[in-house]
Structure formats: C-alpha cells, structure tokens
Image (tube, helix red, strand yellow):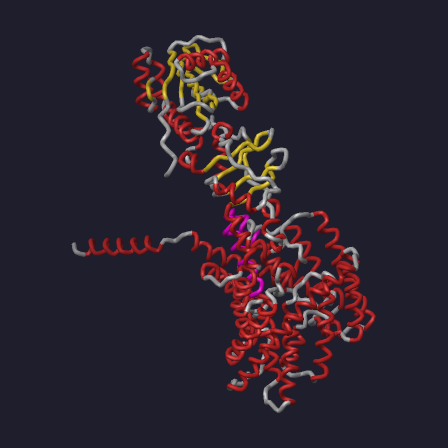
Amino acid sequence: MEGTQQPAAPVLGALELDLHVPDVAVAVTYLSAQLSRAGWIEDSTAFADAVMLREQHGSTALPIGVALPHARLGNLSRIALAYAHCPEGLDWGGTRVDLIFLVAVPKIQATAYLALVQQLTKTLRSDKHLQELKSLGDGGACRAWLQRHLNLVLA
Amino acid sequence: MSRKPWRSQRLLVGLRLLRNLRIDERHTLLLWAAVCGVLGALAALGFKELTAWVLFLFTGSHEGFVDAFSSIPPWQRLVVPIVGALICGLILQFGTARVKSQNTDYMEAVTLGDGVVGFRSSIIRSLAAMFAIAGGESIGREGPLVQIAALVSSLWGRLRHLPPARMRMMVACGAAAGLAGVYHSPLGGAFFVAEVVIGSIAMETLGPLLIASTVSALTVQTLEGFDPIYLFPQFSQSGPADIGAYAIAGIAMGLASFVWIRLLSGSKTAFKRLHLPLWARLTLGGLLIGLIAMRHPEICGNGKSLIQGILADQYTVTAIAILLGLKVAATCISFGSGAIGGVFTPSLLVGSVLGFLFGALLNLAHFSIVPAEMALISMGAFLAAATNAPAMSILMIFEMSMQYQVVLPLMVSTVIAYATARSLSRRGLYSHSLMHGARGVLDRPLGQITIADMMRTQPHYVESDASFPVIAGAFLREPRQEIWVHAPFGFMGSIRLEEVGPFLRDSASAETVLAMDIVDESTPRLAPETTIAEAFKVFAGTSLTRLPVLDADGVLIGEVPRSDIFLTISEIARRG
C-alpha cells in the first residue's frame, strides 16, 4: 500500500525493578519523568496529567495485577514504554497491581498500539510468564525478557 | 486395493468442483429474493383482502367495485366516496403530522439511500389508501400495495442486518413480488421494477427480481389460484395489414399518453391552487366522485371489470365513448385531490377504451379489425408510453391475457407508442415530479442539492469511552469500513476497520483500550449545507468510504457514503 509505512517497533525507554510509591499518581509522575529524562517525551507533567485524565475514563488495570496507563501524544515518532515492578503492590482503582507499563502512544499509530496491548495482555495472561517476569531481579535479564516476549526495542 | 485410491480421487474431484462453485454473497441474495417473494405476495394479498373488507363495510357487497357500487342506492353512492375520502384525508393529515421526515418512497429507497422504507409512515399511507380505494375513488391499488410489499422486504433486510446495497435490492424484490402477485404477472412485475424503478434491465438486478416474482406467483397460486387477470377469447393471427393498423394505433397511443399525463398533473396543480388543507381537498374530490357515481356507478374503482367488459366486447361504442370521458374525469379528480393509490389500472382502462374506439373507427372505414383485439394491444401500447417501460408492458399484457398471438402486434405497437411519447416528453406516469410535485430533491439542479438532502440519519457511532470489545462488536454486527466516535462535547473522529481489523477476533485482550485511545481525530467532516460539488472535493482527499455530517455545534447528525454521491448524480442524470 502506498504511503503507509510500518511504524517503528515500541521502545523500552525506562525500567524500574523496585518501585516504592504510595499511590497511582506518584507512580505515573515518577515513570513519566523517567521517560522524559530518557528523551522520549518532552513535557513530563503534561503527559502525566493526560495519563491520569485517561484513567478517569476507565481504569487500565487488569485483574492479573498489571496496569497499562497511557496517553496519546501528537509529536511522538514511536511508541515508548516505561516498565516498573512494585513488589509491595499498589491499589489501582480497586485492583491490586504490581506490574506497571506506562505507554506514550503517537496519535496516528492506533494499529501499533493495539498490537502492543494484545501482545502484552496475551503474554502476561500466562501465569508462567507472569511469575517469570516478576522473579527477574536483574535489569539486564529483565530487558532481555521484555525484548524477547514483547518484541520491544531496547533504548 | 485399487478401489480405495479411486474412491478418494473421486472425492477429491468432487471437493474441487464444490470449491469452484464459490458460493458468495450474490448467491445468497437469490435466497433472500425468494424470501422477499413470499413476504411481498403475502403483504400484497393482505392489503387486497383488507381493502375488500372495507369495501364490504361501506357497501355491504363482496363483489368488485362496479358491482358493489351499482348495488347500493344513489344517495349512498354519493355518501360513501365522501366518507372514504374524508377518512383517508384525516388519517393522512394527522398521521403524517406525527411521523416526519421518514422515507416512504420505495422508488427512492431502491435507487439511493440505505433501502430503509419508513415503517409508520408506510402503514399510515397504506391505511389511508385503503379507505380512499374502498370509498370508490377512481384509482388503482398498485401504489400502496407495492409500498407495503416493499416495506415488509425492507423490514426483513433490517432484521438480517443486510448492507445498504443489499437492502436496496430487497426493497426492489419486495416491490416486484407485490406486483407479480396482484397482477398475476411474474415477468411483468420483475420488469416493472427493472424498467420503472431501477431504470435498467441488467442481469445483476434482474436475476433476484425474477426469483422474487416467481416465488410470489407460486405463493399466490397456492393461496388463491393463478388465472390470467383478463380472460380473452381467441386472439386472431395478425397479417401485415393488421400490423400496419397496430403501428398506427401505437402512434395514437403515444400521443394520447402525453395528453393523459398532462391531464393528471394539471388536475393535481388545479387542486393545489385551491389552498385547502389535505383532508378538505380529498373530501372535495370524494364529493365530485360521489356526484358522478350517483348516475354512473361504473366509474368507481380502478376499472378492472370495465376492461374485462371491453375485451369481451360487451359494450356499445356509444357507451364506451361516454365511459372514456367519465373515467378520465374521475381519475383526474381522484389523483388530483391527492387520493393515495395508483394510476396503473386506470391507465390500462383508458388505453383499452381508446383502442376499442380506434378499432371501431377503422371498421367504419371498412378496414376489418376486431375492436376488442385493438383494445388489448392499445392497452399495452398506452401503458408503455405512459410508464416509459415497453418491455414490462409487452410482458404484462401477454401474461394478463395468456394469448401468444398478441405478442407480434403488441411489440410493434408498444415500441412505436413508447418512441412517440418519448419524443414529446421524458416525463412518465411514475416520474418523481408527477407523483410528488416538482419539489422532489433530485429534480433540482445539481448545484442546489446539499448534503442535508441526501445524508443518512442515525449514523453508527460509539461513545469515546466505549471499550475495545464494544467497538469490535459494532464492527462485527454490521460490516462497515469505519465507525464514528462521539464524545460528550461533540464529534471526535473515526476508527477505521483497516486499522483495527486484525484485532477484532480477540477483542477481550485489548479491553483496556477505549475508543478515545485509537480514534483518528483528523477525520474530514461535512456540514448539512455542503453542496455535492464540495463534498466531492472532500471525498477526493480521503480514503474513507463515508463521511460524518456535523451540525453547527459539532454534533454528529448523519453520514454520507461515497457511493451515495455517485448514485445521486447518476439518478439526476437519468431524470434528465
């Protein structure tokens, strides 16, 4: 097809294996700042606000303890993620969540975003995969795992 | 050991044959056409029965219109048409005031739009027609009858969630079935819809129409028998001289049909000039019909039994000449005053009367021809000229009389009448401007037609916070290329099937995705006042197959498929 080029694969922009935060807002603010520091998004505060606004329309927490907070940005060239593991768990609008994938989505990449979400949900619905990911304590091993199972590109 | 491989080979060949059959949507359409055939026939018969029942209520007679009205005293002949017209008028006046802007025109439902025939307004119009017809108005039944047959087919299509193009075909099949069932003319019914409603005899559309007609005819045959409508004694073989006479009759019928259409539309304009409310206009029409019926009850009804009498050579020339004047006047009054019905059978009658008189005239000039035979042929010629549908007319007269001998003279006379009428005017009996006045949307110049005239209301949309499984459900329920997203503040954008298609099957694993996460907010928009020319430009710049229509506040009020723009233009071109 003319004019439609394959968008670049989602990139893992930040990783936090031992996150201790009191609530969702702090978690989102912190991970947004990480993505911003890594150079993937420009205005960290505006992005965090957009993510929290989006959560008001519908929680992104899955019953398996994974949350996929996200917001859309107009000037982004590819999907960027920040991954965090909260060993103590977090109350995410009534659901206990310990894995967070914060996603910055370019406005025109609906297809790539849907592909990512389905891939992520399908992979982590398998209990074996979920426990495997949670057990990873080393940053390098975790990056490699995410690269292999979710087809993420490492920054 | 040699048997088994041989058997499996045969099985393979069979499988390959099956695969080559490729049963696709066009084939299932034939099945739906058959369903429409049954529904259309039942609806048409139902309407006929109910009308007969109202006629019994009015006159106490189970006979045809002429016999029923002849059997009651003159004062009652005056009262019944007035009462019938008044009830018809009241139903129309107060019924249609409540349901506005519904599409009742099955002809328009077939040629453009989404093939939805308005339910309540169709019922109201048919109910009104029932009282006007049973009240003795000189008008036919085909209008409401086809309407109701088209309505049930349209309802069936909606129930099956058929796409618009198929819906339009369903309505067409219903209309064909209705005509085929009532006139006992399966070929004529199918060709009527092809020639008059769709405007072309293409196999792609004719196939389903023929199936619907056939099934309708079978249904009627099972329920009430299927004899030719007009019994005709043996039609004689035509020689070259006879054919010459029929050709001249063709020219005469072409000219006469031009006058006939002028009279009908003139009468409509004259009644409109009175500036009376609809019910009063109809009652006035009923009064005039009643006054004529006091002395001449034979003008009541569509004229079917009169045609039978003429073809059976039962009347004197003087009686027929008087009948012509009265019947033309009565039909103009009924049609002009706004009685709902049809002018099909009245036109047949005028054609047959003119033909009979022409035949008698030839006899006076010592040319030997049977006036009743001339009447039958002229009936077809007049019909072809008035409806702009020569193929339908040839087939219908053949089917109505079941005499093969009529075909040769019929073809000559019909084609000549059609050509004569077309050279005078392109307007036919079923022209939009005749049926609905000159205000028809598609009779306006192209530059004046706006999106508001052609948009489809009730566009399919999801709320901005609808979850992906809800969006997937909307796409799967109704196959379409895009769906609109509406937020509390107004229209937001579109979601394209092309983008989300691969994820529809497993929509549950994207349950955290909402419409607002994937909506394309750069969707071009149309306004109700956008002209077709401007809409063309907007469509040229997008790959969307339809565009949303927003009001001044940004609220989604409708949508326009790309194909409708083309259909509208082709329909305007066709109406010339």
Above or below: residue A46 compared with residue B418 = above
Q: Residue at x 41, y 17 (%)?
A: A40
Above or below: residue A103 compared with residue B571 = above
Residue A65 in view in this figure: no
The answer to if B483 sits in the magenta stretch is no
Quarter of the figure with the N terminus of chain B: bottom left
- Horizontal side of A83 relative to B351 (left or right) equals left
Residue B20 in view in this figure: yes
- Horizontal side of B494 relative to B312 (left or right) equals left
Please tell me in which quadrant of the rendered image residue A124 appears.
top left
Furthest toward the bottom, the residue is B366
Q: Residue at x 20, y 54 (%)?
A: B4
The answer to if B156 sits in the magenta stretch is yes
Residue B548: image x %, image y %? Answer: 55, 39
- Horizontal side of B567 relative to A154 (left or right) equals right
Residue A87: image x %, image y %? Answer: 41, 10
Please tell me in which quadrant of the rendered image residue B149 appears.
bottom right
Quarter of the figure with the C terminus of chain B: bottom right
Q: Nearer the viewer, residue B152 or B242?
A: B242
Q: Nearer the viewer, residue A54 or A90?
A: A54
Residue B401: image x %, image y %? Answer: 56, 76
Q: How many marks?
A: 0
Q: Residue at x 71, y 71 (%)?
A: B65
| Magenta residues, start to end | B153-180
Residue A103: image x %, image y %? Answer: 43, 21
Q: Nearer the viewer, residue B62 or B125?
A: B125
Furthest toward the left, the residue is B1
Q: Magenta segment, principal secondary structure?
A: helix
